[in-house]
Image: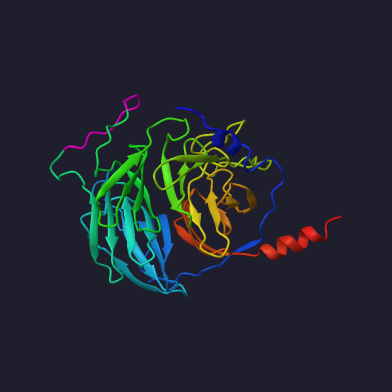
Amino acid sequence: MKRSSAFVLALAAAPLFAQPEIPFDSVPDFFKYPSEMNLGEMASVAVNSKGHIFMLSRSNVTGPLYGTIATQVLEFDKNGNYIREIGKGLYGFGYAHSIRFDKYDNLWVVDKGTNMIMKFNPAGHVTMVLGRKEEAPDEHEYRKAGDPPPRHVNNYYNQPTDVAWDSEDNIFISDGYQNSRVAKIDKNGDWIKSWGSRGADPGQFNTPHNIGLDRQNNVYVADRQNARIQVFDANGTFLRIIKINVPPPPGAKFVLGNTPPSPPSTGTMGAGAPWTICITQGPTQYLYTNDAFPGRIYKLTLDGTVVGMFGKAGRQLKQFNWNHGLACPSENELYAADLNNWRVQKLILHPSKSAATAAIQP
């Protein structure tokens, strides 16, 4: 695959200079839920137009020790009060990966375990299903290391990860851990096309983990294993690559596992390897993403310039343990699906404090 001039220019994005730390707070004990309820791994979070927060929790586990069914969608009001569970016992729920809202307040759930994408209306009822899970009596065949990539098949998904929409309501699915592509479907659920294959060249993917679109219908894909964000137009034409080239601070450690002497610059645990995509809808659009190591959340302009960052890996408030999803209802209010800490954190950013501090520096 040819390397375009856009790709060469993209490598200059997010240059190696000191990036401002954005002061922020994590609101303690924001969510109130029944005393008998515990949350599980927090895979994703989304906010609807009413300000209600929806958590995707891997909890309420049933089935065998391995290969369990573990998907819950929990709704909270804007003050953090528990309202209800959506889709309890749903056939398409297995091991969900992402939840998102479209502009009509429909909730979409992307389930990596069942290979399905489900659309719920505001009442909580399923109105569209994409993909299909295996038959219950079938024996699942797990891929082994060294196996060739699976064959792409229209309208079938293989461990999909996320969903987004353009201005014409076309649906874009990052697909995913196995298929290494982006699928485009029209608003009626009819297949249009897909692009991408497994690899590291421009236009190829290795774990497209999250996806989002800006108001110009550009598609941003968190190509996690390749430690980059790739940008395409709505037809799949490659535009540029965004790399977050901000080195980890001295002494930064993995939350889980041994920290190597030379921390990786690529792969899932690479510094700047994007796990999430969240694009704000204010007058100026910003892109938020995060890595697992050193555990920071980054604020970028849409051209890929890092304008600030905050947080670190850990288990306390304002720290993250493999943050897996972001919701950004406004530029300075975020919700972080803190996967291994089994929680969602409500984050309030204070960029004006950062600007004031910078202004008084000698």
304 is higher (above) or lower (below) than 124: above
Q: Nearer the viewer, residue 308 or 76?
A: 308
Q: Nearer the viewer, residue 342 or 275?
A: 275
Residue found farthest to the right: 362
Q: Quadrant of residue 206?
A: top left
**Left or right: 245 as drawn, with respect to 109:** right
Number of marks in the rendered image: 0
Q: Position of residue 163 (x, y in %)?
A: 37, 52
Q: Position of residue 218 (x, y in %)?
A: 46, 50
Q: Nearer the viewer, residue 179 or 94?
A: 179
Report if residue 258 lies within the magenta region. Answer: no
Q: Position of residue 266 (x, y in %)?
A: 53, 34
Residue positioned 58% across, 61% down in the render: 284
The N terminus sits in image quarter: top left
Q: Position of residue 32 (x, y in %)?
A: 44, 72
Residue found farthest to the top: 146
Whether residue 347 is visible: no
Q: Nearer the viewer, residue 153 or 143?
A: 153
141 is higher (above) or lower (below) than 290: above
Which span of residues is magenta-colored?
A: 139-148
Q: Quadrant of residue 72?
A: bottom left
Residue positioned 56% across, 67% down in the render: 27
Q: How is the image coloured?
A: rainbow
Whether residue 275 is visible: yes
The C terminus sits in image quarter: bottom right
**Most prominent secondary structure in the magenta stretch?**
loop
